[in-house]
Image (cartoon, helix red, strand yellow):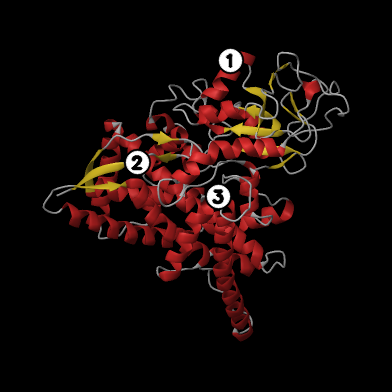
Amino acid sequence: MWPAGGGDPWPPASVAGSVTAALLVAAVIARFIIIPHLRSSSGIIKPRRPGTRPGTPAASGGAAGSSSAARVPAGSLGWPVIGETPAFILAAYSARPESFVERRRALYGSKVFTSHLWGSPAVVSSDPEVSRAVLQADASAFVPWYPRSLMELMGESSILVLGGALQRRVHGLAGAFFKSPQLKARVTADMQRRVAAAMDAWRRDAAGAGATTVRVQDEAKSIVFEILVNALIGLDEGHEMQYLRQQFKEFIAGLISLPIKLPGTQLYRSLKAKKRMTKLIQKITQEKRRKMITKCEDRPQGTTTHHPRDMIDVLLGNGSDELTDELISDNMIDFMIPAEDSVPVLITLAVKYLSECPLALQQLEEENMELKRRKSDMGETLEWTDYMSLTFTQHVITETLRMGNIINGIMRKAVRDVEVRGHLIPKGWRVLVYFRAVHLDAAVHGDPHAFNPWRWKERADVTAGGGGGGSFTPFGGGQRLCPGLDLARLEASVFLHHLVTGFRWAAEEDAVVNFPTVRLRRGMPIAVTPRT
């Protein structure tokens, strides 16, 4: 995964210019010794059975079974020290980041190949079944791996790196809370209120001129961040919310940066920002803990507690000594990333793709206008179930996730020799499960670069949840499937509903930037005209 963006177009110029250098320097620092006996004179690795690598035992089991016929995939370790990282970055900055995988897939005749990325030998998978097996595997085979700067910022308590029973507990508690009808109802009401306020401002700005220009990406970030933060830590609008967002922007700018903590560096500033956020969140946590103890002492025996108001309430209510204040604050910060990155970019990309596909926009308008008329005639307000029942709207969101690839992929580290569907992944090697190459593979999704929401009509399993096996994994998969996937769909549905029922728009030209995170270069400016 390549995480998150900030409130302004991200990364800032000061960060964007150093990203490539940061990654290459990190590769150099991380690895001074290449494994020379894995190379032929041409640098190409031929498929090999386990046991042919000196000093390494044969595969002793794996995510998909074990066999003596398993082979290290064909591929190349690239240049000494830096491997194929420069080629990967060069492709990532282009209009077709998947070209890195496509060229090697054609060269080696396989969707799974060997490379050398971020300072380590790696197996890259664009095969749906291999990717699914890696995602489903537990910590006895693979553990998460992230760049050093990201690991420094997230900390050892982050759900991104936790393993075992503690990871399952935190993930399960978060998933149950984010899927709860009570939270969905509250998020829906908050989204409706915030979206209405923003769009009322658009109407005022358009008065007289007939239209006004807004940047969808900025508007979506402003709306979504405060709603999710309120759901996570119970913080309302005001001075502390603005302070938290300022610190979060500084924090998130360092997720992919030089792994140097000297004063003046981005990583140093980001770590300082995290300390300030942690202090605020732990103050809130401790106040909640004291109130919870007081209520427990005062509550008559046999009475039940109320539904938790936010995620901190959920974790404190579990009663586990492992859920420390440090763990809670680390994970609340982690869960804020989608509010500044994933959900706003999903909304923005949907507007872009709809602007380029008039037929899809027309059908989306018709579906949403019909719902609005029906609820108005009945004298009812829209509830979260109404938004999620908009079938074509959900198809649009699904297709946006497939084409947009907000999460390009994830990396894992093999803790032992692992065999996955005939491919040997040696101990210590990384695995890049590259979602983007699967989502844009013509053999998996016909005409993959065309925005076609209708392709999902027969795939209700995908639209309704996070399913799709290894062929559709915008939210990851396995034990680390994104727990907030339902909320992401809901928030996007609410925004799109009020946009298409309240306005017509003309989009300006804008381009998608795919690295180090997905975003719109200009924030997706559109000239909106209120419907009459």
Identity of the amino acid at label 3? Gly
| Position in image of residue 32 (x %, y %) | 74, 34
- Amino acid found under the numbered disc labelled 1: Ala
Earlier-in-chain disc, 1 versus 2: 1
Can residue 425 be seen at all in this image of the molecule? yes
**Label 1 sits on residue:** 106
Q: Residues within 10 Å of mark 2 (few under 14, many from 20)?
A: some
Q: Residue at x 30, y 39 (%)?
A: 364
Q: Which residue is mark 3?
A: 254
Q: How far apart in space, not on screen, are marks 2 and 3 (Cα)?
A: 21 Å
Callout 1 secondary element: helix
Q: Earlier in the sequence, mark 1 or mark 3?
A: 1
In the rendered view, tell whether residue 133 sits above or below residue 42. below
Q: Nearer the viewer, residue 87 or 184?
A: 87
Q: First in sequence: mark 2 or mark 3? A: 3
Can see residue 109?
no
Q: Residue furthest left?
A: 208
Where residue 403 sits, quadrant-wise, is top left
Mark 2 touching mark 3, by CB under 8 A? no
Vertical arrangement, residue 67 with respect to residue 377, above or below = above
Spatial CA distance of label 1 from label 3 is 36 Å
Q: Secondary structure at mark 2?
A: loop
Q: Amino acid at mark 2?
A: Arg
Quadrant, the N terminus: top right
Compare residues 95 and 398 and report the one nearer the observer: 95
Return the residue at label 2.
Answer: 522
Residue 39's spot in the image, x, y percent? 76, 19
Q: Are marks 1 and 3 in contact (CB under 8 Å)?
A: no
